Amino acid sequence: MTESRNKGNKKRQRTGFEWLVLVTALAAIIAVVGALVYSGLASDGQPPRFRFKVIEAPGAAADTAAYEVEITNEGDVTAEEVLVSVTAGQQEEEVLLKTVPKGESETFTVVFPSGVRETPVAEVKSYKEF
Amino acid sequence: MKRDNATMPDDVMRGVAGAVIIGLPLIYTQEIWLEGRSLPPLGILSLLAVSFALNLTLSHIVGFNSGRIERPFEDAVVGFGLSFILSAGMLMVLDRIDFGMPIGSFVGVVAIAAVPSSLGFALGNALAPQEGGEGSEKLESGWGDLLAAAAGAVILSLNIAPTEEPVLLAGQLGWPRLLLLVVLSLGLSYLMVFYADFGGRHERVAHGGAHQTPLAETMLAYLTAFAMAGALLAAFGQLDGFDGPSLAKTTVLAFPASMGAALGRMLV
């Protein structure tokens, strides 16, 4: 009895609502899987490569200098425990970032206790691959 | 009117209820946000393949549509696809993903978060049965509903309250997103409890007092969930007093708490 009911249900035409949820769900699956395949093909497994942008941050206290540092990981692998050194003349500040995901940027601010004359230079001292 | 075993909006809401209940604690997990952005796409695709196979099996055994197990592939596709949309929506409200991210990171986070949600979707009929939970008839309506809401809120938010995530999210989300969380908490719990048409609810609503109207019950259940979230955060030393940051933390935790409260009320 149940078997025959199930056979009957298999032949039943889908309702408009069923088509709507099925097409929406299929579109979502195709979009996610397609994007993952695309990003997999576009990636060639390059290790983390870092690019910096350093700009002066407003609102620093008198006799100090604050800089906003943006670090971008241009590699194909996420970097963990990224130790960044920002140097301005004789002054050096170090910042430890938990992660810098692949293809993304992180921003942090460094403050030098005494003013600086030249634009600071940032570099990565060490990191681990995710 | 339900035609044969056709999927109706209330069946989908039952699946959504299962997806939110199973998936939300993981959406509130930092490691999920990081793994989704960092795992190689092939690894994520393999995980999706395994989880689709599990979905297919669960859709054949349980599913989200009461009494319908004859189209497991279609139901698995529906649950899987809608879980992607649901996860993406929740992650966007929580500001964990945005369109400025690299496409691989964006879909990576959505895909990883959707895995448990999709399994919850396929278990919708077991997690939120149409006939209500066992022994539900013994609980009186009114205060009984609020008691069930409080218990459900504690169950779902207890594993999130002691973690760093509510504090982190509260610090990063602005007031517009926090307000959106409140609206989402109220809207989703209303839809889960009243739209999904769980057993006996119509009769109990019809015979209950003024606080048994859907709107009043939804509001009261949310307040209960909010109070439970605040109490749990305070118990774990995450609140500093009655200030803005504490309110923000409580609002963040009240979202999963309100989903738990909805689950509690669905089962009674």
Image (spheres, coloured by chain):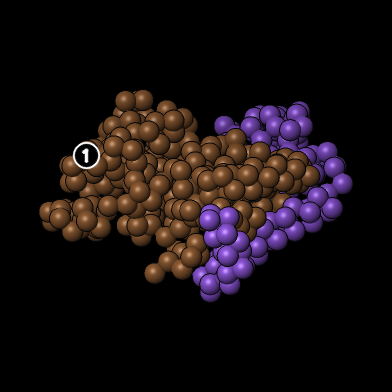
Chain colours: A purple, B brown
Q: Residue drawn at (57%, 59%), measured in percent from left and top?
A: A4
Point 15% across, 53% down: residue: B208
Q: Which residue sits at x=33%, y=38%?
A: B134
Residue B22 is situated, as x and y percent measured from the top left of the image, at 49, 41
Quadrant of the image occupied by residue B205: bottom left
* Residue name at image x 72 percent, y 46 percent: B49
Q: 10 Å neighbourhood of mark 1: few (<14), some, or many (≥20)?
A: few
**Residue B75: quadrant of the picture:** bottom right
Residue B262: in sight, yes or no? no
Chain letter behind tag 1? B
Mark 1: which secondary structure? loop
**Residue B217 position (above or below residue A118):** below
Q: Position of residue B77 (x, y in %)?
A: 63, 56
Q: Could you say which is closer to the camera, residue B167 or residue A24?
A: A24
Q: Quadrant of the C terminus of chain B?
A: top left
Left-right relation of B224 to A10: left
| Nearest the eye: B170 or B188 | B188
**Which residue appears farthest toward the top when viewing the image?**
B236
Q: Residue furthest bottom?
A: A16
State which quarter of the image contains the N terminus of chain B: bottom left
* Residue at the farthest front position: A1
* Residue located farthest toward the left when viewing the structure as drawn: B209
Residue receiving disc 1: B139
Say what amino acid the circle numbered 1 marks: Leu
Residue B256: percent from the left, percent from the top?
40, 42
